[in-house]
Image: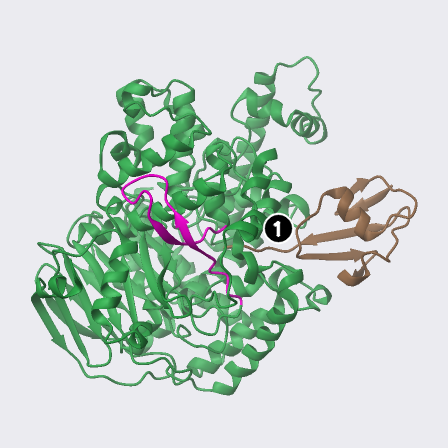
Amino acid sequence: MIKVNGKDYPWEEGLSIKQLLVNKGFTFPLLVVILNGKAIADNEYVGTVVNDGDEVKIIHLMSGG
Amino acid sequence: MNRLEMKTAHKLVGTFNYQLGQLEKGYANRTLYINLSTNGFAEKPVTELMKQKFIGGRGFGLKLLWDGIQGHTQWNDPENELIISPGPIGGITQYPGAGKSYVVALSPLTQSAMDSNAGGHFGPFLKFSGWDALEIQGKAERDVIVFIDGTKGTVTIEEAPLEAVNSHILVEQLTDMYAESEADKGTISVVAAGEAAEHTLIGLLNFSFYDARRKAVRVKQAGRGGMGTVFRDKHIKALVIKSPKVRGDLNNPADMSALKKAGQKIHEEIRTLDDSQCRMRKVGTAHLTQIMNDYDLLPVRNYKFGSHPEATKIADDVFLAKYFHLNGHDECWYGCSLACAKVVKSFQLKTGPYQGKEVLVDGPEYETTSAAGSVLGIFDPEFVIETNFYCDTYGVDALSFGTATAFVMECYENGVIDDRVTGGLKLNFGNAEAALELLHRMAKGEGFGKMAGLGIRRMKKLFAEQYGANPDFLQDIGMEVKGLEFSEYVTKESLAQQGGYGLANKGAQHDEAWLIFMDMVNHEIPTFEDKAEALFYYPMFRTWFSLNGLCKLPWNDIVPADNHLTAEPAKVPEHVHNYVEIYNGVTGANIDDKGLISQSEVVYNFQRVFNVRMGFGTREYDQVPYRAVGPVTVEEYESRQDRYDAQLKDILNLDPEGKTTAEKVQILRNYREEQYRKLCDAVYLRRGWDANGIPTIKTLERLGIDFPEVAAVVKKKMTQG
């Protein structure tokens, strides 16, 4: 189990940030991802692995009129 | 009829000559007053106090309106005013999004002060012609055009009987008429409404700009709150301005290098990052349609639901592939590299008075894809484009049209109204033909079109009084606050955004705050105090754009590559810093980011007191329809039953088993309505208002707006209770 934005979320072996975004249905492009307190750049989403017990913040910014 | 015949038919009824001059640090230091009842003119000085307290734009509009009317003035009294002001930063070309005009008037929908804004060139041209604001009072006897020639220093009022009323024709006619040549068309901007603005209370204003590359007059809309209705009620056919040729230094800024530095930085961000962020340059705000659908936030069938499988048919990729005409220059003011003003260059109309004609359509934007699409249960891109076109040319706010028509459709499907009321229109959800016919009838002021054009608040009253409808049900499903129809977001799962709509000064528009992701997805503001802080900071920050002639989009529809490393990425700190720099750079002031919020807080509280003065501005007027808070009907609850059942268990510690859906709807409702009450309490406290939502004298004193006439309004209301 991991924490995503403070809520429990099931973990799977080899889970990347990119896959986590897909699993959560997070399609909004303006995101800030923080893994265990460390900001992850968007070009690192594919290669960054989330481990069991990790805490992930996926902060959606705002856009639109 | 040719332009010469039209021009020859003009009758000059008023002339005013003025001294041309240069702007000084973003200000002309005077405003132009016109009275259409007397055909009189006046030049009003802008005092230092006015600049310090009200800054410009919406601030100037509110102050001039306050001084021009009484507490009992009605929207259609000659005394009501229509004010247009761009603000001190307005018209710079170094930083994106600096061409906004802000319009203020007493609204026919809310009967209080309304502010609405548009791109296009009128606002900057007004300043370059020597005026910080245009203030129009009175009512002309016959249709007039007001022409400001900023190259000669003249203002004329001309009766104009022959020109068209509908905007897409009128703006072309007047641009041709007042430009001296094809090359001169870029110096002309027109403000116009349309025939529906004469027959409805949801009239909008179109602000034109000449698109030299497409050789077409384009329009941007000040849509909200019936500004076009006020315009036509004053018998204004159009405002026309001819500006000196635009240069980057016309504002005479205190420090041009500060503007250039901030501009260069953000232009580079846009160039390198927009394609991987919001794609504003390719699809504009339409990029949001699919995203809102993905997050269950896209209004579907009068906000019952937040998504629909067919929403992909009206998503950005559809418009990009088949309809948008891109040429890399879709800015609505010079220097805006975000360039989000998309256009359908040639569209053949299928209905209405211009059926069969090929027209240019400005848009659609995100809001239009909902208001002329999903909220009506219609997922046809060509219906979206056609409705977009007719709303603009008729002068109808597409958002109010869509939200009001969705309300009508739900009433029709529930038997509140029938074919006898609608004049035979079968206004079921999904009936595009009937929805367009309703729009055409609004334009003509015919039959049910006239009733629907009154907006939701008045329809609720009429349906209850004349057709015996249950007023409680109408209150629950009628998506309006303070008389203004909701813009296009579903708020059921975001308490903070319910407040974003309910507590907004003008009514249910999201331009004060859009907190849904922060609240519903990020869970960053869990407590009432957190939400109240967000409902302090964001409305104040976003108010600041309206004081300065700025568009909000370059603030956070593009973010720096390293924004994720900042302490508060949602605020986009680097861009906030840019705004501080360009404000100081234009005006020569020395504010910081806190000063920016303080400037807004003054005007924001002044507007709240304005509402009090007009008989509103207290807690009861901050209430939202329950459809914005939670599921009204069994159908809605059951469509998201897993979500709601889980909330009953997790939040209320109640076992939903064995309870009917109707019982669960009521339990959830009791809880959510109490949450909203507590949210209001917390927000009032944070904003320095009393328990009834009125700014306290202490707050007015802190902000330096305890002027006798302002304090008197508050004291009188507090005494009355």
Q: Residue B125: x percent and y percent?
A: 32, 73
Q: As rendered, which of B352 and B674 lies closer to the eye? A: B352
Residue at the image position 43 percent from the left and 36 percent from the top: B479
B232 vs B327, left or right, is left
Q: Residue B184: x percent and y percent?
A: 29, 76
What are the residue bounds of the magenta stretch? B338-365
Residue at the image position 48 percent from the left and 36 percent from the top: B375
Q: Residue B23: x percent and y percent?
A: 33, 83
Tint applied to chain A in the drawing: brown
The residue that disc 1 covers is: B530
Q: As rendered, which of B241 and B34 lies closer to the eye? A: B241
Quarter of the image for residue B158 reads bottom left
B371 vs B206, left or right, is right
The reply to whether the magenta stretch includes residue B17 is no
B618 vs B430, left or right, is left
Tell me which chain the residue with mark 1 is part of.
B
Type of secondary structure dominating the magenta stretch: loop
Which chain has been coloured green in this picture? B
B643 vs B187, left or right, is right
